[in-house]
Image: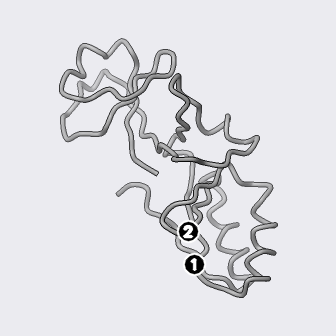
Amino acid sequence: MQKRLGAEAAAKNLLFDNRIIDQDRELLIFEPSTQLLPANIETYSLLELNNPELTDLFGDYGFISEQGRAYLYQETVIAFAVVDGDATEIDMALLQYEEYLIAKEHCNNETIYFMDKTYEGLIKKVAAAYDINIRIFDLDK
């Protein structure tokens, strides 16, 4: 998962210091930088997923770009990983999460799960019910 920034294509001439890496119709996608953009340019924080498994819910939270890359709108999702627990209990918890999953990504020997941000409480309750440990990622860093 990599952080990206999206801006309307009309802003292309204002983004000269940023490297545009992708596009989706009228949305330009580029690497985030410390450059301040004009206040009248609407931007979107995006998460680029590498080799994700997408569910039917994905289209409500992200898109596939013209280059075939998968992006999620960062403000709408929560990301977490299961870090410890009995294998059977982990499997049961994952069954509970399954209907809410937007996507999952395998990264550095762990699986990162993406769900709607409003389900943070549900994620924690399921983890507690099955006595498993999870790590919720701080997507703002």
Q: Position of residue 64 (x, y in %)?
A: 58, 31
For image coordinates 24% across by 29% down, the residue present is: 18
Image quarter for residue 115?
bottom right
Q: Nearer the viewer, residue 113 or 73?
A: 113
The residue where tag 1 is placed is 83
Q: Is residue 111 above or below residue 115?
A: below
For image coordinates 32% across by 22% down, the residue present is: 41
Q: Position of residue 12 (x, y in %)?
A: 30, 16
Image quarter for residue 110?
bottom right
The span from disc 2 to disc 1 (Cα, nearest Å) is 8 Å
Q: Is residue 95 above or below residue 48?
A: below
For image coordinates 74% across by 54% down, the residue present is: 100
In the image, what residue type sits under mark 2? Answer: Glu
Q: Position of residue 66 (x, y in %)?
A: 53, 22
User: For the residues carrying marks 2 and 1, which lies nearer the camera in this image?
Assistant: 2
Mark 1 Cα-neighbour bin, 10 Å: few <14, some 14–19, many ≥20:
few
For image coordinates 35% across by 57% down, the residue present is: 141
Q: Is label 1 in a helix, a strand or a loop?
A: strand
The residue where tag 2 is placed is 110
